[in-house]
Amino acid sequence: MAMDMTMATMSQTHTRLTTHHQLLTALSSSSTLSHLKQIHAQILHYNSNHEHSNNTLLSKLVLSICTLSSSSSSLDYALSVFSQIPNPQTHLSNKLLRHLSRSPLPEKTIFLYQKLRTIDASTLDRFSFPPLLKAVSKVCAFNHGLEIHGLASKLGLVSDPFIETGLIAMYASCRRIMDARLLFDKMSHPDAIAWNTIIDGYCQNGHYDDALRLFEDMKSSDMKPDSVILCAVLSACGHAGNLSYGRTIHEFVKDNGLAIDSHLQSALINMYANCGAMEFAREIYDGLSLKNMIISTAMLSGYAKHGMVKDARFVFDQMVEKDSVCWSAMISGYAESDQPQEALKLFNEMLRQRIEPDQITMLSVISACSHVGALVQAKWIHTYADRNGFGRALSVNNALIDMYAKCGNLVKAREVFENMPRKNVISWSSIINAFAMHGNADSAIKLFRRMKEENIMPNGVTFIGVLYACSHAGLVEEGQKLFSSMINEHGISPTLEHYGCMVDLYCRANNLRKAIDLIETMPFTPNVIIWGSLMSACQVHGEVELGEFAAKRLLELEPDHDGALVVLSNIYAKERRWNDVGLIRKSMSYKGISKEKASSRIEMNNEVHMFMMADRYHKQSDEIYEKLDEVVGQLKLVGYKPSTSGISIDLEEEDKKELVLWHSEKLAVCYGLISRRKESCIRIVKNLRICEDCHSFMKFVSKVYEIDIVVRDRTRFHHCSGGSCSCRDYW
C-alpha cells in the first residue's frame, strides 16, 4: 500500500507527502535525481511546519543522492543538502566522506573536510581519517595531507592501524617515500595491508630494488605474504627487469602451495613479459584450462609490448569477452609497432561494437594518427575526443599538439596549445618541438622565452626541442648560447641526446671541425645517431675521408646498419669508386641486409594512399604516370633539370634521370594533383629523407601549379609554396 502511494507520488509531483514515514518511503524508492529534488522541496515544507526540523530526512536524502549518482552536479547537490543540516552526526559525515573518496572527484572529500573543520573538528573520529587520506593520496594534495596528519596527532589517533596505513599510502602517493618508510618502521605490528602499502609505495616511486629488499624483510618476520603482496612484488620484478628474482617468487608460490588466482596468474605473465621472457609467459598461459579476460589481456599486452603483434592479435581474436582494456592494449600494440593504419582500423571496429574507449585508448589512437600523418583523420579524432570528454585531459591535449604537428598543421597545433586551460612543461616542450620539426626556429625560440617568462621551468626534453630547432635553421651561435644556459643557468646536465643535437648543429652548418672536437671531448661514448649525423654531413659536403671514418665507426657499433652501408656506398659512388660500391652491395646481399624501401603516403578523399618507387599497384597508375610526364614537361619549361647526384648505381645518365623521376613522393604529388578538389594543400608523408631532386621538384610544382605542398620526411617538414621551401634549402 505504501509503495503504491510512493509510485503515485513519483508520477504526480503535485501530490503532497505529509508524514515522516511517507517521505522516508519516497526517498527509499526514488530512482532519479529529479525525483529526489522534488522530495527535497517537500521535506523543506514538512520541516517548516514542525517545531523541530527532522535531520533524519535530510541525512537520508544526502545518502540517496550519493547512491544514485557520482557526477559532479549530484555530488555538489549532496554537499549543498549536507550544509543545510545544522549539527550533522559523525556517522553521516563519515559515510559522505567515504562516498566522496571513492567517487571520480575525490577532491570534493577535501572540500567537505574543510567545511567540517569550520563547523567543529570534534565531529571527526577515527573512521573519518582513512577516507580523507585516501582522497589526498588520489589527488596528491600533500599540504592537506600534512594538515590531516597534524589533526590526527592532535586528536590522539595516529596509533590507529587504519590511520597509520592511510598515512603511509598518502606519503608514498605524494612521492615522500622516506617519510612513508619512517611511519611504517614505527608500527608495532604491521599487518598484511600495511606491508602491501609500503611495498606498493616503493613501486609507485620507482624504487623497485628497495621493494624487493622489503619483501625479504617481510618473509623474515612472522607475516605470511598473500596474493596481493605477491602481485606487487612481481610487478616490481617486472619493472626492474629482475627475471631471476621473479622466477624465485614463482617457485616460492609453488613451494608454499599458495592458491594462484587469476590476479596472480596475470601478475606472473606480466612479470615475465616485462622481463622479455615471453616463452615463460606463454608456458603459464598455455597451461591454463580457463583463460579469463584479465589473463588473456595480460598475455596480449606482453606480446604487444615486444612488437609481436601477430601473436597478440591471435590471443585477442580468441577472447570471447573483451573490455576497453584489451581493446586498448591491442590498439597500442599496433600503434607502437609502426602499424598505425591497423590501430586506426581496430579503433573504428571498437566503436562499431559500442565499446567505450578510455583515455589510454585515445592516447594510442592519437599516436597512431600522428604516425600516419593523415590530417582529416586527425581532425575527426580531435572532434571525437572533445565530444566524449577526453579534451579536458592534459595528457590528451599534449598528444593532440604532437598529432597536429606531425600531420603538418602547425595552426591547429598552436590552437590546441593556446586553448588549454592548464599547461605543464610537456605542453610547452610539445609546441616548441612542433615548430622545431617544421623548421620554424624563430617561433620555437620565442615560445621558449615565453615559457620562462611564465615561470615554467624547462627540462631536458625542452632543450632537445629548441636545440633541434637551431640545428635545422643553421643558428649556430643561438644554439651554443642555449646549450650553455642549460648547464649554467638551469643546472641541467647534458645527456647524449643534447650532445647529439650540438653535433648535428655543427654538421649541418658545415663546421665539421667543431663537430669532431665535441665528439672527442664529450663525457659519453658516441652512439649510432652521432656518428650518423657526421657521416651524413660528410656525404652532403663531400668530405670523403671523414665520412668513411664516421661510417666505419658507426658500423663497429651496429655492423648491419643498412643506412650506414648505403651512405658509405653513396660516398664511394660520388667518387666513382665502383669496386668499393660493389663490395658493399655484395656484403649486404650476403648478410641479407637490404636498404629500407622508400614509400610515400598521401591522404585524399578520406583515404590514405601509399606509393613505392616506380610502382604501378595503384588503380589509377596509368593516369598518374601520364600526369607525371605532363608535370615534368611543364617544370622543364621554367628551369627544372632532374638531378641524378643521389643515384649511387653505375648507370647511363639517361637511365638515372628516368629512375629519379619515379620516386615515390613524385608519384604521390601527381596523384594529389589529379585527385584534389578544392584543397589548397597537398600533404605527403615519406618514410626516408627526401632527396635533393624531389625537393627541387616540389618547389617547382608549388610555383607552376600554384599549390602548397607539405612533405614530412624522416627528420623534418618541408613547406613548399610559390617556388620556395620553409627549410630555405638548409636541411
Image: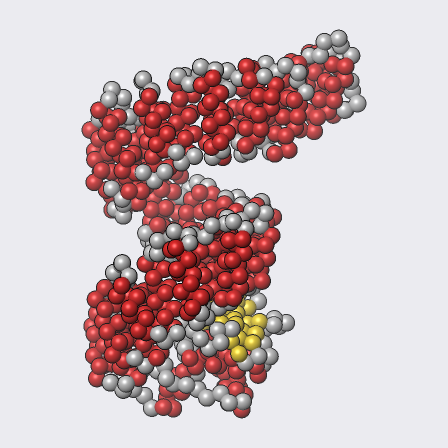
Q: Is residue 336 visible?
A: no
- In percent of width and height, residue 62 lies at 63, 22
Picture quadrant where residue 562 is located? bottom left
Picture quadrant where residue 160 is located? top left
| On screen, residue 605 above or below 394 | below
Along the line of sight, which residue is nearer the eye, 336 or 394? 394
| On screen, residue 51 above or below 524 | above
Residue at x 21%, y 35% (from the top left corner): 248
Residue at x 52%, y 82% (from the top left corner): 700
Task: Give the position of the C terminus as an image quadrant.
Answer: bottom left
Residue at x 63%, y 30% (from the top left corner): 76
- In percent of width and height, residue 47 lies at 74, 14
Give the number of callouts.
Answer: 0
Along the line of sight, which residue is nearer the eye, 494 or 127? 494
Q: Residue furthest front?
A: 488
| On screen, residue 268 above or below 722 | above
Residue at x 27%, y 87% (from the top left corner): 576
Picture quadrant where residue 505 is located? bottom left
Along the line of sight, which residue is nearer the eye, 398 or 258? 398
Along the line of sight, which residue is nearer the eye, 261 or 193? 193
